[in-house]
Amino acid sequence: MIREIVIYGDPVLRKKCARVDAVDEELRALASDMMETMIDAQGIGLAAPQVGEPVQLAIVDVSHDPECISYLRVNGEDAELADIMPLVFINPELEFGDEKDVMAEGCLSFPDIRGDVTRPYDVRARLTTLEGEELLVETDGLLARAIQHETDHLNGVLFIERMSTATKLSLRGKIKRMQQDLGVRR
């Protein structure tokens, strides 16, 4: 079932989400709905609060661009994107490399808004699948960025908070118009 995507201004986007202690049919149904919603919206990631559910569940799928990374290791072994995409995970814990990268990002909760965001280029992500499998995903590029972006959502952090002050100021009017056009009240 395709769910409505929560738009910037809704307080659920600022909440630190609850850890998932048990995977049940309700959580599996939520993950399935999120996958349909992400695909319908032509996104590469979606976090549960973006559909109004403040739990630590997220999806990332960058399989459309196999060249978007230079390496991928899963539990210490070299892997291909196809081996883990789409990546559905709960309760992520991230460690970052020292190198930073600037890239234009968008967000399904900010339709038609894009801006440069500085993030660590490499990430080591400890993730748990819905099957209870613990994964250590080490990667870079777009996959690392998408995992960081969705994990930020689970911690109530929005991509605009990672932008420079100048970028935020340049987008302020566009964001206000977006909210007005979509009927969002702050």
Image (spheres, rainbow, N blue to C red):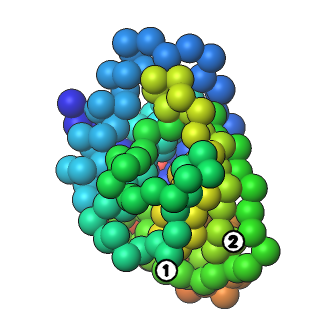
Q: Can residue 183 be seen in this view?
A: no
Q: What element carries label 2?
A: strand
Given residues 50 and 27, the one toward you in this image is 27
Number of numbered callouts drawn: 2
User: Residue 107: image x %, image y %?
Assistant: 44, 62
Given residues 79 and 134, the one toward you in this image is 79
Q: Quadrant of residue 155?
A: top right
Q: Is mark 1 on a helix, strand or loop?
A: strand
Q: Residue at x 37, y 12 (%)?
A: 25
Given residues 35 and 99, the one toward you in this image is 99
Q: What residue type is labelled 1?
A: Ala
Q: Which residue lies furthest to the right in this view?
A: 98
User: Residue 182: image x %, image y %?
Assistant: 33, 56
User: Residue 37: image x %, image y %?
Assistant: 27, 43
Frontmost of labels 1 and 2 is 2
Q: Residue at x 46, y 26 (%)?
A: 130
- The residue tagged 1 is 104
Q: Which amino acid does label 2 sit on?
A: Pro
Q: Distance between the residues labelled 1 and 2?
A: 14 Å
Q: Residue furthest front?
A: 77
Q: Which of marks 1 and 2 is nearer the N terminus?
A: 1
Local packing at callout 1 (Cα closer than 10 Å; few below 14, some 14-19, many 20+) is few
Q: Which residue is drawn at 74% across and 63% down?
A: 96
Q: Is residue 138 visible?
A: yes
Q: Residue 120 carries which label?
A: 2
In this rendering, the answer to whether 182 lies above or below 132 is below
